[in-house]
Amino acid sequence: MTTATPSLSRDKRTRAPKPASRRDSYTGMLMLAPAMLLVAAFVIFPLLFAVVISLTNWPLVGDVEFTGVENYLTAFTDTTFWGSILYTLLFAVVSTVLGVVVGYLLAVLVRSNRRGAGLIRTAVFLPYVIGITSFSFVALLEFRPDSGVLDQILLGLGITSAPTPWLLDATSATVLIVLLGAYVGSGFAMIILMSGMQGIPDELYESAQIDGAGRWQQEFLVTVPLVKRYLGLLTVMGFIGAVLAFTQFFIITGGGPGTGTLTVMLYVYNKAFGDLQVGYATALSFVVVIIAAILTLIQFRVMRED
């Protein structure tokens, strides 16, 4: 006499696992709900609201009128706006290249554990921790032609014979702001690149040395190819940060003299809170975002590996 027990056991073994129950699905959605609400409240809703504002005149004080795409059409004929974009892109290229190069040289200097390297790392990284805002106020005082330390040093060394109005010339003001940004931001680039350099095996440098490569040849043939991902990251981050530069220009020059140091974000700020044209300023912001996104995609395309 046979029984059906083996057949039942075999059916149980081959039966597919049950899908997640509805209760599990509801539990997962409930756990995601707070994060989804935060994203909706602080990202999606403000973005949609900004789109609406860009399609109106929105004078900040007064009646609001729907103008459609008039703000965007005005932006394409605004010569001051496009002039500020060109100046910002030039500033972004120069400051990004300088920041990455200085950061790389500092990383080469402090990547070993020789005596004093830790102190140098701390001293170089400290300005990044303090921030560009504090140093911008310091620079505003030190670049003054009547009492600034820079002029006092140059006069004492006999390099200049009279105080120089550094911030009243667009070229000298831009150079000083670029150097200030490199001083503040190079510490971050140094830390990122140093972390990548310390992961390179010493055997690669020894092999290159045996093949006759000198000190700087080892850097270009060994170090640079192995840290190019870090260089790409710093390039993209530095370029985006420079395109959105606002604080140092607002504090030090205010966009002057005239519009000589007017960045695009400072121009947007002036339109929104100086001329009270919030709708137009919002439209300009979307144009800037689109331009920055296109340039970033181009950067990724150029730096993408085969």
Image (tube, helix red, strand yellow):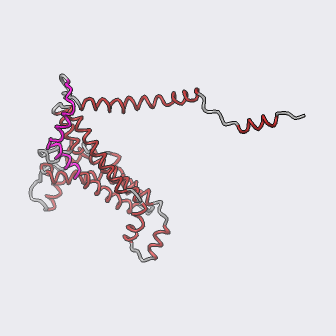
Q: Report the quarter where the N terminus lies.
A: top right
Percent position of residue 94, x then y: 25, 55
In the figure, 106 relative to 291: above or below?
Answer: below
Residue at image x 24%, y 34%? Answer: 282
Residue at image x 16%, y 54%? Answer: 172
Q: Residue furthest left?
A: 162
Percent position of residue 48, x then y: 32, 31
Provide the major secondary structure of the magenta segment.
helix
| Residue sitting nearer the eye, 149 or 183 | 183
Q: Is residue 74 magenta?
A: yes
Identify the image quadrant of residue 75. top left
| Residue sitting nearer the eye, 79 or 174 | 79
The magenta segment is 64-90
Residue at image x 40%, y 74%? Answer: 213
Percent position of residue 21, x then y: 60, 29
| Residue sitting nearer the eye, 291 or 117 | 291
